[in-house]
Image: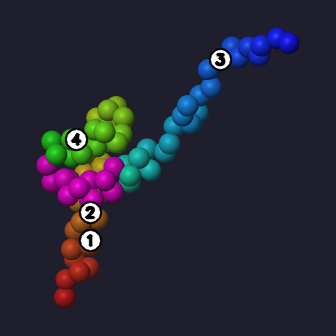
Amino acid sequence: MSATIIPFRPVDGPLVEVNRSAIVAEMAKALIEAGSYYCERDAVLTLLGKFKAVDIAMLIDDARQVAMQEAVVALEMSGP
């Protein structure tokens, strides 16, 4: 019997990148849950363990903007 030779290591992640708008939505959700969308430093610290540093650097402004929009809408909907 011969051993099976695998010339390439299997891929651990997806072959195609996830849509950027989906990443922004996930980031905004994390920022809202933590309440750290007002301050950019707090937002970066919140996202560092959960997303790639490159994605954070490119999409932090968009994620904060989406989080602030959702917070304003929620605030206005909860009013009398």
Mark found first going from the N terminus, 4 or 3: 3
- Cα gap from disc 3 to disc 2, whole angstroms: 45 Å
> Which amino acid lies under the numbered mark 3 shown in the image of this protein?
Phe
Do the residues bearing badges 4 and 3 touch, measured as CB atoms within 8 Å? Answer: no
For label 1, the crowd category at 10 Å Cα-Cα, with few meaning under 14, some 14 to 19 and many 20 or more, is few
Mark found first going from the N terminus, 3 or 1: 3
Q: Which residue is mark 1?
A: 73
Mark found first going from the N terminus, 1 or 4: 4
Camera-side mark, 4 or 3: 3
Q: Which residue is mark 4?
A: 44
Mark found first going from the N terminus, 3 or 2: 3
For label 2, the crowd category at 10 Å Cα-Cα, with few meaning under 14, some 14 to 19 and many 20 or more, is few
Camera-side mark, 1 or 4: 4
When the figure is inspected, residue 53 is found, relative to residue 35, above or below; the finding is above
Element under disc 1 = helix
- Identify which residue is drawn at 19% across, 83% down: 79
Q: Which residue is mark 3?
A: 8
Camera-side mark, 3 or 2: 3
Element under disc 2 = helix
Do the residues bearing badges 1 and 2 touch, measured as CB atoms within 8 Å? Answer: yes
Q: Position of residue 50 (x, y in %)?
A: 34, 42
- Cα gap from disc 1 to disc 4, whole angstroms: 23 Å
Dominant secondary structure (helix, strand or loop) of the stretch shown in magenta:
helix
